[in-house]
């Protein structure tokens, strides 16, 4: 049996890519979007998570909260800051 080929969708900016990802994965309810930002996958000491992900991991002993929630920011070119 053959698998279907999957081609990644490419967007012009980080902002467009994230918005499209949320749109496709959260078709019904976008208020509980689950997002994890890993800035450097070679150094995963610090990650950013959405509030819905935080609710799932907050009581895990291997996570430490080091900041507060903030809106994901993009520069004028749509690149994540």
Image: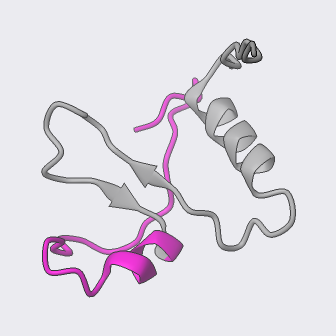
Q: Within the image, what quadrant is residue 34 found in?
A: bottom right
Q: How is the image coloured?
A: one colour
Percent of width and height locating residue 23: 79, 48
Vertical arrangement, residue 24 with respect to residue 26, above or below: above
Residue at the extreme front? 1
Q: How many marks?
A: 0
Image: magenta residue range:
52-81
Percent of width and height locating residue 76: 57, 30
Q: Residue at x 74, y 38 (%)?
A: 20
Instruction: Please identify the dominant SS of the magenta region.
Output: loop
Q: Within the image, what quadrant is residue 41 found in?
A: top left
Q: Residue at x 26, y 87 (%)?
A: 59
Percent of width and height locating residue 64: 15, 74
- Asked if residue 23 lies in the magenta stretch, the reply is no
Q: Is residue 67 left or right of residue 62?
A: right
Q: Residue at x 50, y 34 (%)?
A: 75
Vertical arrangement, residue 22 with respect to residue 4, above or below: below
């Amino acid at each position: 049996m053959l698998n279907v080929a999957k081609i990644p969708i490419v967007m012009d900016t980080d902002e467009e890519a994230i918005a499209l990802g949320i749109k496709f994965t959260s078709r019904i309810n976008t208020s509980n979007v689950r997002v994890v930002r890993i800035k450097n996958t070679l150094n995963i000491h610090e990650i950013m998570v959405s509030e819905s992900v935080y609710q799932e991991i907050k009581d895990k002993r291997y996570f430490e909260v080091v900041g507060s929630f903030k809106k994901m920011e993009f520069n004028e070119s749509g690149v994540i800051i």
